[in-house]
Amino acid sequence: MNKKDYKRLVDRYIKKPNYMHNIKVAFISGGLLGSICEIMYKLLIYLTPLSKVEASSLITFLMILITSFFTSIGIFDKFITKYRSGLIIPTTGFAHSVSSSLVDSKKEGLITGLGSNMFILAGSVVLYSTIAAFFLVIVKVIILCLV
Amino acid sequence: MLSLKFNNVYINDYDAIVGPNEIKGNTKNIKNVISDFYYDEKTFELAQIKMERNVIYNILKNNNLTNNNVDLIIGGDLSNQIACTSYSLDTFDISFLGMYGACSTFIESIIVASSLISNSNIKKAICLTANHNLVAERQFRYPVEYGALKNENATFTSTASVACLLSCKKGNIRVSKGTIGAVKKLGINDPNYVGAVMAPSCADAIYNHFINFNIKPNYYDLVLTGDLGSVGVSILKDYLKEEYNLDLKNIIDAGSKLYKTIEDINDGASGPATLPLYLFYNVLQNKKYKKILVVGTGALHSKTLVNQKEEIPSISHAIELEVLS
């Protein structure tokens, strides 16, 4: 049997992920989480003398803290399995990837373990978002010049 | 493909330590269970080392053996450089041969041990293997606490350590024949589809075993494969039919049968200890089958080569077991 025929055989049995279900669950869970953050943000602006920038920073900080805490006690990965990728949209995904890498390598030393493994998953996010930001700024400058 | 006949090789005893998920599965009479993945140790790797050490201790104790009575320990596991197995044996002072055949390691070890015993080079050997879910997760997949969604075709590495004692002393289970498989790859490069990766080499080993010994397909009461998973075993059946015109109805896959239903476990169990665990603590406990062909299947994948988009090779080895009473 050649590779092509074998691939056809394999495709007969491979289970395809239920994308529509995942999208629905992620849309609802991500939307709910975003709404909660938004409500907290508005409340902060109403009830405290914080500025908009300060309030949004505080909410982001809180989300990172909660995610890292849940990751460290070992339950955040179960949430994601249940509520899909909606949960990792508002900075929580980044915090989760960093803190899970940290938990994983805590026994392997500060330099060889924690230090070098901290961004093992998030490294790509840091690199490519920096590159994307660089090019977007160039686009923004060009558009502003034209206008 | 090389096939060997063994004279006077018997499995005299076996022992296992299993994790919390495996004890709830389709196994019977397992005495040693670890309640958590750390097994009172600091890291998962140390837990696996302790599991392997204790299994050997149990075998030695149950058979009144000392280090001097056992000629050789043969075995391996999934960790890089089979480190966990090597680290677990420093307290024994018994000759050791390390094996790596991914999830076919245990069958590979039995073939080597049987060959040495059959030729009267040694009298007693212990075959050992182990896998720990979280050691494998860290090495092959993501950090343990990272919530990556599992592919529905991916298998779940079980947590267990299994060892068996082989000797020329007559026992209930005889190892009579063995076939050493060849490395095979057929275009699959996704590590989530290990069942599809291993099916061709498994079919190859089964077919060549039948041809080399001139055996008819209905000779065996049971063909027990390693850890193809439920997808892999369906692919194997079709592949055997289309490629070799072999219609085997009595195939059971240990990986897809080990667990009942547990959350997060998609396509069955995997790992080198899965097959011996199901063989010793389910198939042989039933006493229903007299002639069994056991096929260990291993996906020989490396993270580096998978990232370089290379196809994943696989290997399978087969042994024939006769249950005498």
Image: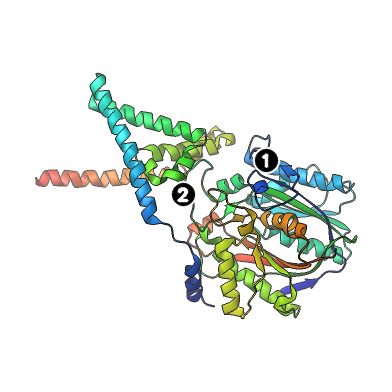
Residue A55's spot in the image, x, y percent? 28, 26
Image quarter in which the N terminus of chain A is found: bottom right
- Between residue B113 and residue B146, name the one nearer to us: B146
Residue B250's spot in the image, x, y percent? 67, 70
Q: Which residue is mark 2?
A: B149
At mark 2, the secondary structure is loop
State which mark lies toward you, 2 or 1: 2
- Where residue B47 is drawn, which disc sits there? 1
Confirm whether circles 2 and 1 share one chain: yes
Apparent side of residue B272 relative to residue B12 in the rendered image (left or right)? left
Quadrant for residue A122, please give it. top left
- Near mark 2 (Cα within 10 A), the count class, few <14, some 14-19 or many ≥20, is some
Tell me if residue B299 comes above or below residue A12 in the rendering.
above
Residue type at mark 2: give it.
Answer: Leu
Which residue is at 70% across, 77% downward?
B217
Q: Chain of mark 1?
A: B
Which residue is at 63% across, 37% downward?
B43
Tell me if residue B1 comes above or below residue B172 in the rendering.
below
Residue B24's spot in the image, x, y percent? 65, 47
- Between residue A8 and residue B316, name the one nearer to us: A8
Residue type at mark 1: give it.
Answer: Ala
- Where residue A128 is drawn, which disc sits there? none
How far apart, in angstroms, are the residues tagged by discs 2 and 1?
A: 26 Å
Q: Chain of mark 2?
A: B
